[in-house]
Image: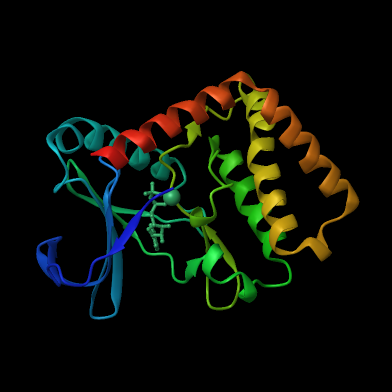
Amino acid sequence: MLKENYDKTDKTKFHFLGKEWEVVKKITAEKALKPDILIVEDKEQFLVAKDFRSKAWIARYLWGPLNICYEKFLLNKLAGVARIPQVIALEDYNCLLISRIEGDEIKKCSHLLAHDFFDQLLKIADDLHARGVLHLDLGHKSNIMVDQDGNPAIIDFNASLYLPPNSLFRPLINLLGKVDRYSILRLKIKFRPQDASPAEKKGVEKFLRLRKLWIFDRLLRKITNYAKNASSHN
Ligand SMILES: Nc1ncnc2c1ncn2[C@@H]1O[C@H](COP(=O)(O)OP(=O)(O)O)[C@@H](O)[C@H]1O
Ligand SMILES: [Mg+2]
């Protein structure tokens, strides 16, 4: 999980797009390969910077630019889709500017959810899949945002996958799209168990059983744990 420092003592102004912006929130990633996240404001206009510029050289010159290039590519594939961030610009080859999603992470305001929150979330996932983008990290509660009316939005596309949405790849998109759908239904069972149907509960149980058997999942967990331990020793 991302370890966060809400850093208020640091610089309070940042220079983006040729002007000064006030820092509203800065999340300094402790992991070597994660960007710092800056939410900045100027005259009630907000933007978010995913910024590798102050990281160690491998993240600054290699991992960061690749990571940013990939996320920008995916977000461009999703241009115009509602309730996800839009690309604003590249401030640098290792600093991506995107639109801010208003609200807070679901784990911090689960009491605010609109009655059809999870139906709306499934609809956003369908919109992503229609463009050939599989998010694949919707189980992570910090990637689901809730606005002040309790409606959802999805962020963080850097673990996502793009497959051309043509007749050749459509069956695979539909199959892998189930990972997103069941991740959402799993959150529904966690946050709104009373609204989840028996079929949804059964489907999620089956999905979790299958996931446990999937060798790549175990491999991925091993790699993630290894990376976590390595970064906490740095
Ligand atoms: N477009 C955005 N609008 C609002 N908050 C955001 C946005 N992008 C990121 N954040 C905030 O920063 C956190 C980390 O960003 P994220 O893109 O999920 O990166 P990571 O790969 O480090 O998880 C999010 O959980 C959210 O609180
Ligand atoms: Mg995230």
| Colouring scheme applied when the structure was drawn | rainbow
48 horizontally vs 58: left or right = right
- Residue in front for this viewpoint, 227 or 15: 227
Residue 71 versus residue 147 in the image, above or below: above
Question: Where residue 204 appears, x then y in whole percent?
Answer: 77, 42
Residue at 54 percent across and 55 percent down: it is: 141
Residue at 25 percent across and 40 percent down: it is: 32
Question: Where residue 9 appears, x then y in whole percent?
Answer: 16, 72
Question: Where residue 72 appears, x then y in whole percent?
Answer: 34, 42
Residue at the outermost bottom position: 43
- Residue in front for this viewpoint, 218 or 100: 218
- Residue in front for this viewpoint, 154 or 190: 190
117 horizontally vs 132: left or right = right
User: Across the whole image, how many numbered discs are drawn on residues?
Assistant: 0
- Residue in front for this viewpoint, 161 or 75: 161
Q: In the rendered image, is residue 146 in sight? A: no
Residue at 30 percent across and 70 percent down: it is: 46
Which quadrant holds residue 38?
bottom left
Residue at the outermost right position: 198
Q: Assign the C terminus to one quadrant of the image.
A: top left
230 horizontally vs 153: left or right = left
Question: Where residue 45 appears, x then y in whole percent?
Answer: 29, 74
Residue at 15 percent across and 61 percent down: it is: 16
Residue 93 versus residue 115 in the image, above or below: above
| Quadrant position of ligand 1 | bottom left
Residue at the outermost front position: 233
Q: In the rendered image, is residue 12 in sight? A: yes
